[in-house]
Amino acid sequence: MSPTMASSLCVFAAMSGAAAGRPGSGAAVPGRLATSQQGAKGKRAAAHPLVASAVTETPAPAPAIAPAPPGRPAVVDAPRRRGGRGAGGHAAWKSVRQERWEGALEVEGELPLWLDGTYLRNGPGLWNLGDYGFRHLFDGYATLVRVSFRSGRAVGAHRQIESDAYKAARAHGKVCYREFSEVPKPDGFLSAVGQLASLFSGSSLTDNSNTGVVRLGDGRVLCLTETIKGSIVVDPDTLDTLGKFEFTDKLGGLVHSAHPIVTDTEFWTLIPDLIRPGYSVVRMDAGTNERRLVGRVDCRGGPAPGWVHSFPVTEHYVVVPEMPLRYCAKNLLRAEPTPLYKFEWHLESGSYMHVMCKASGRVVASVEVPPYVTFHFINAYEETDEDGRVTAIVADCCEHNADTSILDKLRLQNLRSSAGQDVLPDARVGRFRIPLDGSPFGELESALDPDEHGRGMDMCSINPAHVGKRYRYAYACGARRPCNFPNTLTKVDLVEKTAKNWYEEGAVPSEPFFVPRPGAVEEDDGVAISMVSARDGSAYALVLDAKTFQEVARAKFPYAMPYGLHCCWVPRNSNA
């Protein structure tokens, strides 16, 4: 058995919820079927178990091309689950009301005529099964949002991604796969035995691809999460789920970084190894489904690899982070989550940054750095001397001051129960400097004063032409305090060490995605697009001039939209 395959079995055994198979484990109770109702023609509509108990309110309808199918069961407020809260609060934390919708959007302001293509945003948008509410932001079933821009007009749509996890929950009215903090509850002893058997088949690991969305170099669009089986191909025009993205290699693995590095020519990702703590660095050419092993990085700390939600690259190197927030088999097997969920904090194990040469697969640097916690790296680039030799790597990330509490702050109970307290943990642009001269230590400092962006920093994007290269600007979600979640959009100038901020009272914006103007020369010549959940229950796609960071237009949805995570841009005719 190869080390990678052995790692896969170990990871699966940890993630598939064997402990949940024990009676009395405290796992999620099945959701109750919603009461069916009479159809428009007097026919009894089938009960639909997957409905939103925390629903969004729909204003007067706009012209709809594909409305939700008729005959949906009535939606009512759900009782509070044990350890949680009812719906209440901001629309950002309420499940989307209908499975799909498409229609023209009202545009306020003037959209740039050059903005011609499709903005896609993925994220968890459905947190309820019947009367059962999920615990955590990351548990929700994936909702893909689309805004297509052309000739100053906008057409919007959303649709649930048809993962096996979502379809099973819809059919059975309960959690059937293990999600971030949820586990399926067995119906009896034989069911529990079946769950144990599924450890080796991979069948009980979720494929709920609710995290990222990327456009590959060949035009295919993938929705992603941290499970490899959760790589799902979608049609960017119809939002149809086309099927699983099947890797044709034999590298194995069950989890990988949720944020691969994708360019027009290649796809890079990391596969953690829990048997022999380390990471496989793999590459895939555009137009193929075959990953190739470039090299391996052994962890310097333990007892398991650090979490690798994302990582950066430069022109010639892959940067592999190893933070002390590490995978934990014990926590993975629990039926009820700990405050750190699938992870455990091992400050004594040390914090490291490794650098691998893309061409040779050789590790050229491995340095110890101060403790850090990050979900998202922003970018990395190479420093050179006067002779052009690379002397160091600079890597920037959204760093949470080595504070792991951010994970538990994302419980839905916490997000829905804000009473104006300032409880969002501080964050900054953390800048690593990794010397390539054999030094044992690297540096970590703030790239600018965190007060410039309200000590909030996450969900970032840059001009894609600068990935792996020296850059100046980053676009992210910041904070205006007091708050319990990032509530501003910020443009960070890493040269002047300043920030410009957009804020609307009560709004919850999602990741601002930079789209360059065709033919642009300057790095910030373009727009930043963010889906915003407004205080009044409305939702809109906000378009900011990336230079001035002033609003130029908003395209309004006729209903509320829950918060989402990550985005991509598909230029028109990109698949032609």
Image (tube, rainbow, N blue to C red):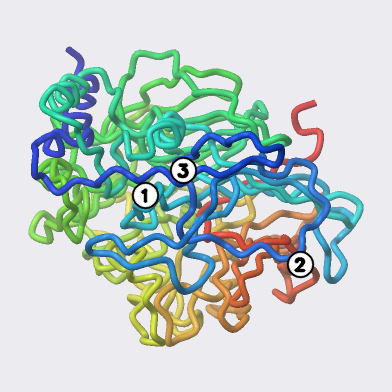
Few, some or many residues within 10 Å of mark 1 (<14, 14–19, 20+):
many
Few, some or many residues within 10 Å of mark 3 (<14, 14–19, 20+):
many
Say if mark 2 contacts mark 3, CB within 8 Å.
no
Measured from the top left, where is residue 474 in percent x and y? 57, 64
Q: Earlier in the sequence, mark 3 or mark 1?
A: 3
Measured from the top left, where is residue 23 in percent x and y? 9, 38
Identity of the residue drawn at 52% across and 32% down: 162
Separation of residues labelled 2 and 3 (CA atoms): 31 Å
Task: Give the side of residue 505 with respect to residue 146, left or right.
Answer: left
Quadrant where the N terminus lies?
top left
Q: Identify the residue under disc 3.
A: 50
| Secondary structure of the residue carrying numbered label 2 | strand
Q: Identify the residue under disc 1.
A: 139
Separation of residues labelled 2 and 1 (CA atoms): 29 Å
Q: Earlier in the sequence, mark 2 or mark 3?
A: 3
Would you identify the image quadrant in which residue 173 lies?
top left
Q: Amino acid at mark 1?
A: Asp
Total tally of numbered discs in the picture:
3
Separation of residues labelled 3 and 1 (CA atoms): 14 Å
Q: Amino acid at mark 2?
A: Arg
Identity of the residue drawn at 49% across and 38% down: 47
| Secondary structure of the residue carrying numbered label 3 | loop
Q: Is residue 439 visible?
A: no
- Front position in the image: 485 or 94: 94
